[in-house]
Amino acid sequence: MKRRSPARRGDRGVLTDRAIRRAQQSGELRVEPFDATLVRPAALSLRLGYEAFTLTTSGPVDVADRATHPDLVPKEFDAQGRLVVEPGEVVLAPTLEKIGLPGTLAGLVDGTSDYARLGISVVLCGQVSPGFGRAAGAVLTLEIVNHLRHPVLLYPGTRICNLMLFASSGSELTYGEMPHNYSSDHTVVASRLADHVRRN
């Protein structure tokens, strides 16, 4: 009897390490590049990519007016190749991995306690919808904030967050089919909120 992949059984719940490996090996879950050592008991760790952008503003931000949105200013890495995050700075950075989910898998991204214990939060939107990056894989954009009074030095290529995966019965409309999505991004892009906020 042929074994069906975890996301196609119709059962629901968190994928554990065995199920994550099976989904990746079958091609159902796209992870590029894939490092088997990053598979955790109930999550897949993702690494910090090799570019970053700081958000800078020159005045109030009107979410419906793209002209007022923060600029994405590329950050240079230091002489040792480290990403320097200044106190209070908001940095957007991609994951090293490109992810692709089928319509039967959903994800949840969370920072790790290692970074939280150093005063660094790693968030953006925790939800990764079914169908994200399915066509060719897409990076996840992370918001990194330094809550300390001194700079923090981060190392690209190292583990920075975890992606939990959940099996489901599938959605009628995948994320990649929705308007204004980020499902084909291969780098950090600016907010598309102004595209769907109606101004009175």
Image (tube, rainbow, N blue to C red):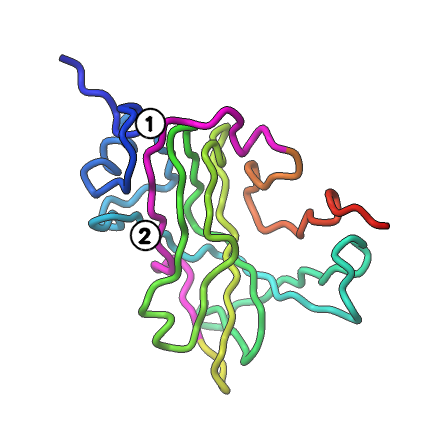
Q: Residue at x 52, y 61 (%)?
A: 143
The earlier-in-sequence mark between 2 and 1 is 1
Horizontal and vertical percent position of residue 67: 82, 56
In-front residue for pair 54/191: 191
Q: Which residues are magenta?
A: 153-178
Q: Residue furthest front?
A: 200
Q: Residues within 10 Å of mark 2 (few under 14, many from 20)?
A: many
In the displayed structure image, the side of residue 134 where residue 31 appears, left or right: left
Quadrant of the image for the N terminus? Answer: top left
In the depicted structure, whether residue 35 falls above or below residue 74: above
Residue 20 lies, with reference to residue 104, above or below; the image says below
Give the residue at mark 2: 45
Residue lying farthest to the right in this orientation: 200
What's the CA distance linking mark 2 and mark 1?
A: 18 Å
Q: Which mark is residue 27?
A: 1
SS at badge 1: loop
What residue is rendered at 37% in x and 70% in y? 115
Name the residue type under label 1.
Answer: Gly
Q: Residue type at mark 2: give it.
A: Ser
Q: Is residue 177 magenta?
A: yes
Who's the residue at 49% across and 81% down the image?
151
